[in-house]
Image: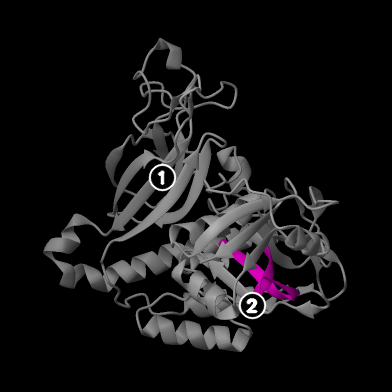
Amino acid sequence: MRRPTLLFLTFAISVPLNAQSSSNPRELTFQISASSPWTDTGLSLQTGDIITIAAVSASSVSSDSAAKRCYPAGQGGGSANNAGLPVPEAGAGALIAKLQADAAPILVGARNELHIDKPSHLFLGMNITSSSPATCQGGFEVKVQTAGSASEATNPSSTQQTSRGSQLKSQLANAAQVFMSGQFGISKPAPNSENATSASGTEATAPVLHTSEALLDAGLRKQLDSLPRRVNDQFNNLGDMVNFVIVGSQKDVQSALAAADWHVADTTNTRAVINAAIQTYDSKDYLAMPMSTLFLFGRKQDFGYEMAEPIAMVASRHHFRIWKAAFTWSGQEVWVGAGTHDIGFANDKRNNSVTHKIDPSVDGERDNIGASLQKSNKAKMFSYYLPPNPVQDAKNATGDGYHSDGRLLVIFLQ
């Protein structure tokens, strides 16, 4: 059993639940497309929360296309022909949501405000079915703004004391439930657990990236062809695939990732507990859960980065490791990365201890990394590149399978 997870859970549960926090709303952006029915936003919501969801069409459709652009409000409204859709009374292709993996979907449309009456977890999707091709093309850019209950605005002094505690309590319960499910097989895992994919009937939706079709420089292609395809653990077991490359100086890479809301992972368990304690008592959220050491080019990662909801990142987080390559391109440093999305806990098939389980569709995390830099305007160009002998079906070092189209995402910073 890995001590870091148990240590963090034990410590976090002991945190006072009456710590104050700001009730200021925050806004997150998601890319929703017809390639997958549901996208897990990672947002755990509490009773009394108010969320505002607004969506616009995210991509254009060529004038010679027979299909129409997808609109959040849907096409044609509800009709008898929509009987097989998730929300029959809504137009085909409309933006819809559900508040648990197994909950009935509801219409969101171009804009909607939801009042949460019980602990929930937000999923977004399009009003289509896998058996029926979409009648429109493109996707949506969806902004989700979260805020506390309406009573907080009129009586903040009475609610700020409890809002933080309620949030921590719910997130810790969610993380603990996922942990118990992965370790002991207890039923009803939380939405971010290893069963999240099957529960929602889908894998994560790949973000919409604006990539270049121009051929990469021949010298750079040659260097990319020479890269190892996979990383390994300390026992030389092959694991995660190399799935992205960033071209830019270390300073620019660190600045760009910080702007895109990526957090540098703690490197030791002791530092993790200390940082968690300091940030909790400063009314902040601990977002730097340690990650294991993996190797590329015969050495451990230079940096590890992660992105997740506070506390719940014990169970679910977006994360990657990067290594500085031995070569440069046009005078710029080149960083080689391996990114995966932790979606819960499972048994480590090497020693039967508990470990994180990854989303088997690793291309989603590759594109999520690119989308975060695209959103922060820190990259000037993205390009996909398919190297020789690409990794398309494999298992990581813990024995979990994953699949990919084998392409590298090459990111050129501003």
Q: Which mark is residue 170?
A: none
- Regarding residue 193, the answer to whether it shows in the image is no
Magenta region, residue range: 316-338
In the displayed structure, would residue 338 be above or below residue 80?
A: below
Counting from the top left corner in percent of width and height, residue 347 is at 74, 61
Q: Magenta stretch containing residue 401, yes or no?
A: no
Label whose residue precedes the other's in the sequence (1 or 2)? 1
Horizontally, residue 184 falls left or right of residue 113, namely right
Horizontally, residue 368 falls left or right of residue 1, namely left
Counting from the top left corner in percent of width and height, residue 41 is at 47, 51
The image quadrant of residue 220 is: bottom right
Q: Amino acid at mark 2?
A: Phe
Disc 2 residue crowd, few under 14, some 14–19, many 20+, Cα 10 Å: some
Q: Amino acid at mark 1?
A: Glu
Counting from the top left corner in percent of width and height, residue 221 is at 76, 58
Relative depth, front residue between 373 and 162: 373
Residue name at image x 67 percent, y 78 percent: 3
Q: Magenta stretch containing residue 319, yes or no?
A: yes
The image quadrant of residue 58 is: top left
The image quadrant of residue 157 is: bottom left
Disc 1 residue crowd, few under 14, some 14–19, many 20+, Cα 10 Å: some
Q: Which mark is residue 303?
A: 2
Residue name at image x 39 percent, y 56 percent: 28
Q: Are marks 1 and 2 in contact (CB under 8 Å)?
A: no
SS at circle 1: strand
Real-space CA distance between mark 1 and mark 2, rounded to the nearest whole angstrom: 30 Å
In the displayed structure, would residue 224 be above or below residue 387?
A: below
Residue name at image x 36 percent, y 84 percent: 282
Outermost top residue:
80
Q: Which mark is residue 141?
A: 1
Relative depth, front residue between 165 and 150: 150
